[in-house]
Each structure stands twice: as C-alpha cells, then as structure tokens.
Image: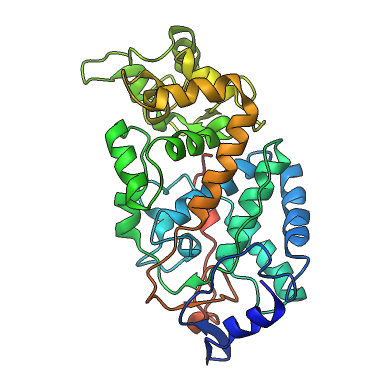
Amino acid sequence: MSFSRHIVAALFCVALLETPVCVAQDQLTPTYYDQTCPYVTHIIRKILLKAFLNDTRITASLLRLHFHDCFVQGCDGSILLDDPNTTEKVARPNANSVRGFKVIDDMKAALENVCSQTVSCADIVAIAAEQSVVLSGGPSWAVPLGRKDSRSANRSLANTVLPGFNDPLDLIKAKFAAVGLDTSLDVVALSGAHTFGRAQCLAFDQRLYNFSGVGDQDPDLNETLAARLREICPTVGLTNLTNLDQTTPDDFDNVYFNNLQVEEGLLRSNQILFSTQGADTVEIINQFSSNQTAFFEAFAESMIRMGNVRPPAAVVGEVRLNCRVINANNSITTASADARLVTSI
C-alpha cells in the first residue's frame, strides 16, 4: 500500500476515547506498514527469538493461535481478549490448550514503544505465525496486513466452528468450507502445522483405551506407536505432553505426512485424512510426503487464504492498545490467562 492509500484508509477511522476505531478495513496488503511502522516484522522476530530460547514449543503455539483466531469470526484478534463472560480462551477447543499470550503482549508493548496505535493485535498474531514457521525451518510468505481488532470475543462460536481432535473427515471439511477454505488442499496443507509442537494425552487417549466404547484401540493407529503412547499416557485424561511428530518434533518439515502413511498420526483428526478410504485428501498427502517443496508452497498459499478470512463488513474494528482488552476498557487490569491455563501445543 502506498503512503497516500494508507492515509486514505486512515480517514475511515473515527476518534473514540482518544484511540483509533475503524468502521471498515482496507484491502489487506503486505506493505501496509511500510511507511507507518517499517520495522514491525523485525521487532516481532526479535521478541520471538528471545521466547524461543526458553521455550521451543512457542513457535507451534503461535501458529496455532493464528489458526484458532481466524476460524472464529475472522482474523480479528478476538482470541486474545480476556473478558470473563465471552473470552474464547476457555472455549472447549482452546481451554488448557492455546498458549503464547504473554509473548503477544511483549510484541505489542514493543511495537507501542516504536509506533504507537498503529499495529493491530490481529496483525501481530499473523506475523508471529509466519515468523514461527520460518524460525522452525519452514517456508516464508508475504503476510497480508491491515487487519483491525474486534471489540468482542465469541466463546459460543469458538465452541462450534473450530476443528476438534476427533472430528470425522466430513465435519472437518464442513468447518473449512464454512470459512471459505478449500476442503481438500487447504485441509491437508494446514493440517501440516502438526509437523511440530506437542499435544496432551487427553487429545488422543481415546485411541489407546476406548476407541469405540468397548475398551479397544483405534485400528488406524500403529501398534508400536500405541505401545509407546501408553507409557506416556498410562491412564485416560492426563495432561502429559508428547510430540505431534515423534520423529522431528521441533522441525517444520514434511515428515508429518510420512507418519500418516504408516499410521503414526497422533491425532485422530489427522490420521483420517489418509486412512479414510477413497478420500480426496490421500493423494495430496502422498504428494507432500514425497515432495517437501510442494508442501511448503501449498502451506504458504493456504496460510495466506486463511489469513484473509475477514470479519463481517459491518463489524467495527480498532487497533487495540492492549491485546487483552478493548480500548474502552484499557484502564482495567486483567489477570493473565497464562496463569490459569494448563497448556499443550
């Protein structure tokens, strides 16, 4: 976006409590902050690197945070809000699972020091996701920018629209279609995010102990892997962690797809992409398994499409000064959700 276009877009903003609130969002573009905050990616990456030195899981966590934000009323930073009545952080797919909020806070604080009231929290999450993939050895992409932050969260919607650990393939496809994503290529490519990160036992222990309600094991789970997982998860409902990819757990690569081919997908929702007979996802998995470049290219394109999932046009957005609260409530001190949540990925 040129400087003049950026100024024109800003004219749609109105002053509310001395903070920027925008009625509509301009077209997303990777150059959105070129004039107003040219070092935005550098600042985010610097804080990410510092966090990564203490927590190698943070890259997978920040990528997942972007995914879980975009599926609920668009990529609008709603997942970051702490309002106790509506917060998405305690929705079923997120509770005891999503993490990385303190790192986003640190990124926001650093950006406010350099370019105040400029970079939205939703854009920070999007950039952090891309930089996390790059830091872990994956592809880069030009992140479309210019999102505004929502002024509300939607816990009830988060409970229904986010793909779950044990969702059947047709439901996963329906949830992707509902946000305008492709039900084959995008489904498979974005599932490749599980090439790194961790999951709690409770996300897959049904596959070990009671798959069909009669104390059996999932027939699509490799026996050797199942035995290893039972050592990590000796009973059901545990929050013990294990690697989503048991081979290269911290690398962003295509090994995840190799795992699916030998029934070593940790989550049922991943393994069914390959194990469902006649599914159009099988051929794509075979392609990505044999060609990492093809996976990287498809993943980058799918991330751009997912990042373009927008809130309804009539929704009023803003650039939050604190990612956890809307600007009208910015003086309220909110407790850190990180202290309350037991995290997984």
Q: Residue extending furthest top?
A: 224
Count of marks placed on residues: 0
In the depicted structure, whether residue 31 falls above or below residue 229? below
User: Residue visible at 61% across and 50% down?
Assistant: 129
**Which quarter of the figure is the N terminus placed in?**
bottom right
In the depicted structure, whether residue 81 falls above or below residue 99? below
In which quarter of the view is residue 111 placed? bottom right
Image coords of residue 296 (percent x, y): 62, 35
User: Residue visible at 37% across and 45% down?
Assistant: 176
User: Residue visible at 37% across and 69% down?
Assistant: 312
In the depicted structure, whether residue 177 falls above or below residue 267? below
Image coords of residue 66 (percent x, y): 53, 52
Q: Residue extending furthest left?
A: 214
Image coords of residue 87 (percent x, y): 40, 62
Q: What scheme was used to colour the molecule?
A: rainbow
User: Residue visible at 74% across and 56% down?
Assistant: 47
Residue closer to the observer: 91 or 337: 91
In the depicted structure, whether residue 55 falls above or below residue 318? above
Image coords of residue 239 (percent x, y): 46, 34
Whether residue 249 appears in this view of the structure is no
Whether residue 146 appears in this view of the structure is yes
